[in-house]
Amino acid sequence: MAKINSVKNFDGAQNKVNRLGLQPLLEEVQSLMESTRILLLEEKQKNRAAAIRELIDASFAQSKTWELKKSGDVDWTKCKVVNGTRVCVGVEVQVSARSEMLYQDILHLKTRIMTGDIDIGIIIVPSDRLQSFLPDRTPSFSYAKKVIAEQDADRLPIIVIGDRARRPRAAAPKKLTNESRRDRITE
């Protein structure tokens, strides 16, 4: 199972969570992450980031309470009514071998926060340790904090959550996308 390794709050995000009554939604995100079973081979770059992303997305989908957004938007959103006021959280899952996508995720959160569609943004990334077992371009917790600062998103209520594998065992298999490469490997 995954375990929350690190959490970083930006621009009073935790105060806003407390003030708006968003703690149950934050706890739900953390619970979904901790209930996601992630098994890895503890060898440098021996696991597939996309396999972990699929597991995390499956956890959100199985909850049946989070809304999946189409590409070009925040990955997952959920709203609730607190004292007659609708409050919302947006979650971006950035576990892929394309670290540059983190910039796009920050833009999605920034846009939705600025337009008032969500109150808090959450970015889920691999912990620094977990990232070392994934493809080298997979973003890490430290990298996410750096990019948020670079993009002036540290002035927005964003929470970064770094997850890690709890019990490394077998590699999350890498996916071959080039058919000719697959043929060479199987010959």
Image: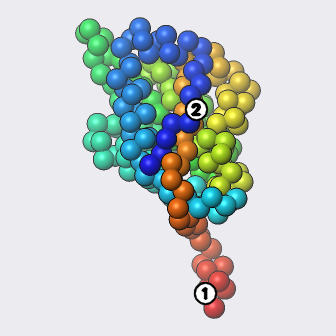
According to the picture, the residue beneath numbered tag 2 turns out to be 6
Q: Nearer the viewer, residue 41 or 118?
A: 41
Q: Quadrant of residue 106?
A: top right
Give the spatial CA distance, label 2 vs label 1. 40 Å
Residue 20 on image: x %, y %: 39, 11
Residue 128 on image: x %, y %: 66, 42
Q: Is residue 102 above or below residue 82?
A: below
Which residue is drawn at the image coordinates 54% and 41% (left, top)? 163
Which residue is drawn at the image coordinates 72% and 54% (left, top)? 136
Q: Is residue 59 above or below residue 124?
A: below
**Tag shown at residue 92:** none
Which residue is drawn at the image coordinates 71% and 24% (left, top)? 149
Is 159 on the left or on the right of 128, as rendered?
left
Q: Nearer the viewer, residue 59 or 91?
A: 59
Type of the residue with mark 2: Ser
Q: Nearer the viewer, residue 168 or 8?
A: 168
**Tag shown at residue 186:** 1
Q: Is residue 34 visible in the rendered structure shown here?
A: yes
Which residue is drawn at the image coordinates 70% and 59% (left, top)? 44
